[in-house]
Image (spheres, grey):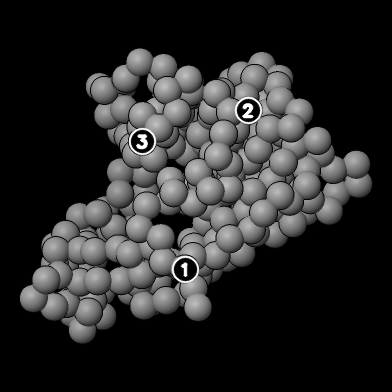
Amino acid sequence: MTTVISDEIDLLAQLLPAPGPRVIELGCGSARMARQMLQRWPDMSYLGLEVDQVQHARNLQDVPPRMRFEAAGAQDIPCADARFDLALMLKSLHHVPVDLMDKALAEVARVLAPGGYLYVSEPVYAGPLNEVVRLYNDEGVVRAAAQAALDRALAAPNSLWREAAQQRFETPVKFADFDDFAQRMMYPSFANHQITPALRDQVAAAFAPHCTASGAHFVRPMHVRLLQRA
């Protein structure tokens, strides 16, 4: 039976009870979990990297103490060697261009201190929500490529990585209605999914059977891989 986890910070705390004070997140988005981490681990300092200029500008409007943001990608991290104890990639590795995934993981290894961890959380290409989303944004290829890149990093001669843990779980996702889904999922600031009126109608029709009086309820299957740097 698959574990249902409402808040992924609980899984992170289970796998890494003391995640290390120096944290970097690649593709940080709004840094929602990082903000929770700052409250749970008060000695933590955090750097969030984001390539989406719209989201980066939003992040700069609210920067708590011990938190910094920079505009940069995982494949070119603007930091010194061995600078961090923990790197986070939360639903972001599959957004790295496929031909740069290996470079991105090498960059993460470079900026992690020996013994540091890389926590990679990726959505699994399965489930009812995925069936709706793939109508306009089919991520089957890039999600598989992300897992393959991790496998290559672990299997490479003289690899600096070992796999410390894996965890599969499901997380609840709720939308008030289709308009809520469309706003959150179909029109992100980091991508143009070229949504035509006809495509929007097609997605709405696929979404409709999941609607109830209390909204549309899904579970998203997730796969966490925790790597440790030698």
Amino acid at pointer 1: Thr
Q: Position of residue 130 (x, y in %)?
A: 40, 71
- How far apart marks 1 and 2 lie (CA) works out to 28 Å
Crowding around mark 1 (Cα neighbors within 10 Å: few <14, some 14 to 19, many 20+) is few
| Residue at left offset 35%, top offset 58% | 6
Give me the residue at 50% from left, 44% from top. Answer: 13
Horizontal side, residue 13 vs residue 114: left or right = left
Residue topped by disc 3:
36
Mark 2 residue type = Asp
Question: Where is mark 1, residue-wise?
Answer: 3
Amino acid of disc 3: Gln
Q: Badge 3: how crowded within 10 Å, few (<14), some, or many (20+)?
A: few
Q: Which tag, 3 or 1, sits closer to the chain's start?
A: 1
Q: Nearer the viewer, mark 1 or mark 2?
A: 1
Q: Position of residue 182 (x, y in %)?
A: 21, 61
The residue sitting at 27% across, 29% down in the picture is 58
Res 63 → quadrant:
top left
Q: Quadrant of residue 35?
A: top left
Q: Secondary structure at mark 2?
A: strand
* Percent coordinates x, y for residue 67 in the rendering: 40, 20
- SS class, disc 3: helix
In the image, residue 75 sits, relative to residue 183, either above or below, namely: above
What residue does disc 2 label? 85
The residue at the far left in this view is: 213
Closer to the chain start, of discs 1 and 2, is 1
Q: Is residue 37 left or right of residue 180?
A: right
- Separation (CA) of disc 3 from disc 1: 21 Å
